[in-house]
Image (cartoon, helix red, strand yellow):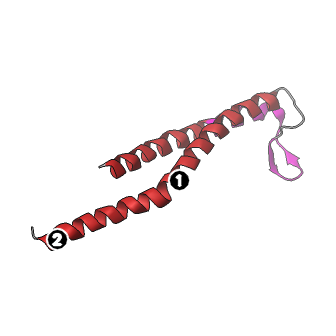
Amino acid sequence: MNNVTVFRKNAVSLAGKIFVSLFMLPILGVWTAGSAVCSILSVLAAFLGLFGWKGVSLTLYPGYDLPRILSFPLGLVLALLLYASFIYTRRLLRRCLHYIKS
């Protein structure tokens, strides 16, 4: 390998690491933290909706509320989806950090 190809390879690698550092790390970090917090809040809202707290209700569209008994199962489904988002986003965030360190 000559010096030009080594320089190009290093330049492309450095450009990729800069792109990941500037754009992907902040987005993935906020997404990971937000999905973790929202999954916990979703479980809390499911319990509060089940026991009939007036501040928490599930609405499909304005003026149509779902029955209270559906708040707990749908809240748990939402919490599981958010937790799965947290797990996979955290995994991708770790891969990005490993890529930057290498």
Residues at marks 1 and 2 touching, judged by CB atoms closer than 8 Å = no
Give amino acid for label 2: Thr
Q: Is residue 90 above or below residue 99?
A: above
Question: How far from the left and from the top, in percent, is residue 71?
Answer: 77, 35
Q: Is residue 99 above or below residue 19?
A: above
The secondary structure type at the circle numbered 1 is helix
Which residue is more in the foreground, 94 or 43?
94
Magenta region? 58-79
Please state which of residues 101 and 40 is positioned toward the viewer in this rendering: 101
Image location of residue 17, percent across then percent down = 37, 59
Q: Is residue 63 magenta?
A: yes
Residue 25 image offset from top left, x and y in percent: 48, 52
Q: Quadrant of residue 10?
A: bottom left
Seen at 43% across and 42% down, the residue is 91
Q: Residue at x 48, y 56 (%)?
A: 24
Q: Going 29% across and 67% down the picture, which residue do you hit?
A: 12
Q: Is residue 9 above or below residue 43?
A: below
Q: Badge 1 is on which residue?
A: 26
Left or right of 26? Residue 74 is: right
Going from the N terminus, do you reach mark 1 or mark 2 first?
2
**Distance between mark 1 and mark 2 Cα atoms:** 32 Å
Q: Residue 1: image x %, image y %?
A: 9, 67
Residue identified by numbered label 2: 5
Specify few, some or many for label 1: CA neighbours under 10 Å numbering under 14, 14-19, or 20 or more. few
| Amino acid type indicated by mark 1 | Pro
Q: Is residue 20 left or right of residue 68?
A: left
